[in-house]
Image: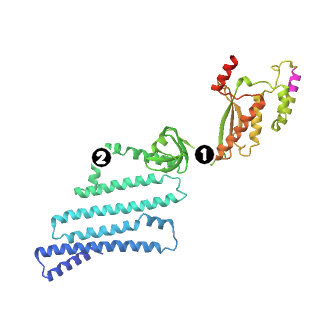
Amino acid sequence: MKITEFKYLFNELRNWLAVKGLSGNELIYSYFFLGLVGVVLFLFITIFVTRQIFIVMVKSAKTKSDWQKALFEFRVFRAIALIFGAYIIYNVVPYLFIYFKNWHFYALIFAKIYMVLAVMFAINAFLNAVVSIMESSKKYADKPIRSYKQVAKIVFYIVGFVLILSIILGESPVYVFGGFGAVTAVFILVFRDPILGFVASVQMSAIDLVRVGDWITVEKYGADGEVTEINLTTIKVRNWDKTVTIVPSYAIVSESFKNWRAMEESEGRRIKRHINIKISSIKFCDEELIGRLQSIDFLKDYLKETQAFIERYNAENTVNPNNLVNGRHMTNIGTFRVYAEKYLESNPHINKNLTFMVRQLQATENGLPIEIYVFSKEKGLKRFEEVAADIFDHLLAAVPYFDLEIFQSPSGSDMRNFARRVD
């Protein structure tokens, strides 16, 4: 409806009331009351009809999509209809308050503010719908979309606030924006976290630091679990114990954290654990021990080849055989290490294409650590722990067969047994 049509309708209302014999205050208040009722009814009808038109247009589309669902869910059509209502109110005010000059000024300010709020409400609804669509898309599922949405909302909220303030003050928005220069420091202080969070979100997205669904560990904040949400200022992590930890976005960029995504995308998950061997149990293999070890399938070929090599070497170098320290001889710890390698090679859950070794670490007061450093094909927490447990269950049980002992700090019962033997 054009502005001239509003003018025509209100002129017709005034003429009709005059024909009915009304004049003076009766004409003024009757004109205002009937005009207000008419505007309210027309406003509701316009908003309803506009909304229904958009709904019918969308529903009549041949293909149904997530866009339609999102537009309905976030009431975008109602928001757009409110803009039409705001337009009507703004154009009706000059004619509705024609007899109330003082009210006319404030009503016009209210109409302008309502128009700004209606536009902001529509933008907000549409932005929510767009973000909902992007979050449901696999293409953007791992991006911090909500962070960008929050930044966009902050920007247009500030713009809306400036426009409303300029309407109330009767000044140009440029003048109001210029006045913000005096409070820039306060603004930065108040919005420090959102600003840092926005910068961090841009950096995280640019270099692909964190995605929704990643498993991250941030020791400082006690976070160890899956990222469920990335906002402007925070990252929500659902820990494996089902608790939730909130980590500041900027902490991911400025501080140390661990992202397990590369492991999950790789061909295996690392098993890096060790067994402490009691040093006093380490010795050269004598004939009796070698004879017993030959019954172990994994060691048959190794013992045969190694023993032949040692005998040949010692014979060539005329080694005195009366003392095992002379020449070359197998040790129980070395043989156990070879056994552990053979056993792991036979395990179908171990990826032999990645780092694979059984090694000695530096001896400590707790014994000599024999470390297993391999990668499990099973990367899920439960199956991974089961594979690792099965390996060490077997190796721990196999240690005594090599005349080795596992180091263990003495317990109360050990001390009591020692005291009895002393007595």
- The amino acid type, in three-letter code, at marker 1 is Ala
Q: Quadrant of residue 216?
A: top right
Q: What residue range appears in magenta?
A: 310-317
Whether the magenta-drawn stretch holds residue 314 is answered as: yes
Q: Which residue is mark 2?
A: 181
Residue 270 placement (x, y as % from top left): 65, 41
Element at label 1: helix
Whether the magenta-drawn stretch holds residue 72 is answered as: no
The mark nearer the N terminus, 2 or 1, is 2
Disc 2 to disc 1, C-alpha distance: 46 Å
Q: Is residue 249 visible?
A: yes
Residue 248 placement (x, y as % from top left): 45, 44
Between 122 and 295, the one nearer to me in the picture: 295
Name the residue: 41% across, 52% down. 151
- The amino acid type, in three-letter code, at marker 2 is Gly
Mark 1 is surrounded, within 10 Å at the Cα level, by few (under 14), some (14 to 19) or many (20 or more) other residues, namely: few
Between 363 and 120, the one nearer to me in the picture: 363
Name the residue: 44% across, 67% down. 72
Q: Which mark is residue 253?
A: none
Q: Which residue is mark 1?
A: 262
Disc tally is 2
Residue 187 placement (x, y as % from top left): 33, 45
Q: Nearer the viewer, mark 2 or mark 1?
A: 1
Decide if residue 335 is on the left or right side of residue 186.
right
Magenta: main secondary structure: helix
Quarter of the rendering occupied by the C terminus: top right
Q: Quadrant of residue 162?
A: bottom left
Mark 2 is surrounded, within 10 Å at the Cα level, by few (under 14), some (14 to 19) or many (20 or more) other residues, namely: few
Q: Quadrant of residue 108?
A: bottom left
Q: Is residue 104 above or below residue 199?
A: below
Element at label 2: helix
